[in-house]
Image (cartoon, rainbow, N blue to C red):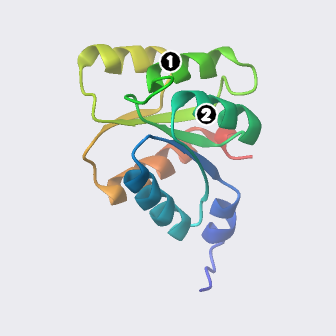
Amino acid sequence: MFDFFGRKKKTNKIKILIVDDEPDLVQTLQDRLEMNGYNIVTAGNGKEGLQKAIQEKPDIVLLDVIMPVMDGLQMLEALRKHPESKDCAVIMLTARSQQQDIVRAKTCGIKDYVVKPFDLSELIEKIGDVLEQHPAAVR
């Protein structure tokens, strides 16, 4: 399919790291985001996610909170301390809706906080909004 406005070409450069321990959700997100032209990297826990964020240098991280090994908030705090990943755009994508979790995540400079269950179309819009507002994310 041709895209005369160059959008597809632009999104092919955008890399999104999905960090979540729910394989079905990860696969659904990966399939849908790849259909929208994004390059996807995945990790099943915060420790693996942190390693991949440093190695892969994604433009955006979609990050769950409740995960084994290292939870998403711990990963987010570690991400912000590392020079290679401190400015990475992060969207929390989690079932946790407690105010203390939202405040902690916002303190670490997240771009958005999405509570599961969510609408995939709205998430894709939020990703587009973050990319527009965070031009440093797009290399």
Q: Secondary structure at mark 2?
A: helix
65 left or right, relative to 4:
left
Q: Residue at x 52, y 67 (%)?
A: 36
Q: Which of pointers 2 and 1 lies earlier in the amino acid sequence? A: 2
Q: Position of residue 25 (x, y in %)?
A: 38, 52
The crowd level at tag 2 (other Cα within 10 Å; few <14, some 14-19, many 20+) is some
Q: Residue at x 47, y 32 (%)?
A: 111
Depth check: give the residue in front, 50 or 126. 50
On screen, residue 40 above or below 45: below
- Distance CA(mark 2)–CA(mark 1): 12 Å
Which numbered marker is on residue 122? none
On screen, residue 38 above or below 131: below
The amino acid type, in three-letter code, at marker 2 is: Glu
Q: Residue at x 49, y 52 (%)?
A: 128
Which numbered marker is on residue 74? 1
62 left or right, relative to 1:
left
Q: Quadrant of residue 2?
A: bottom right
Depth check: give the residue in front, 125 or 74. 74
Q: Position of residue 119 (x, y in %)?
A: 28, 54
Depth check: give the residue in front, 41 or 21. 21
The amino acid type, in three-letter code, at marker 1 is: Gln
Q: Position of residue 49 (x, y in %)?
A: 59, 34
Q: Give the labeled residue for mark 2.
A: 48
105 left or right, relative to 131:
left
40 left or right, relative to 104:
right
The crowd level at tag 1 (other Cα within 10 Å; few <14, some 14-19, many 20+) is some
Q: Secondary structure at mark 1?
A: helix
Q: Most extreme residue toward the bottom, as rendered? A: 1
On screen, residue 39 above or below 129: below
Using the rendered image of the protein, determine whether residue 125 is visible from the camera's viewpoint.
Answer: no
Q: Residue at x 45, y 24 (%)?
A: 71
The image shows a total of numbered marks equal to 2
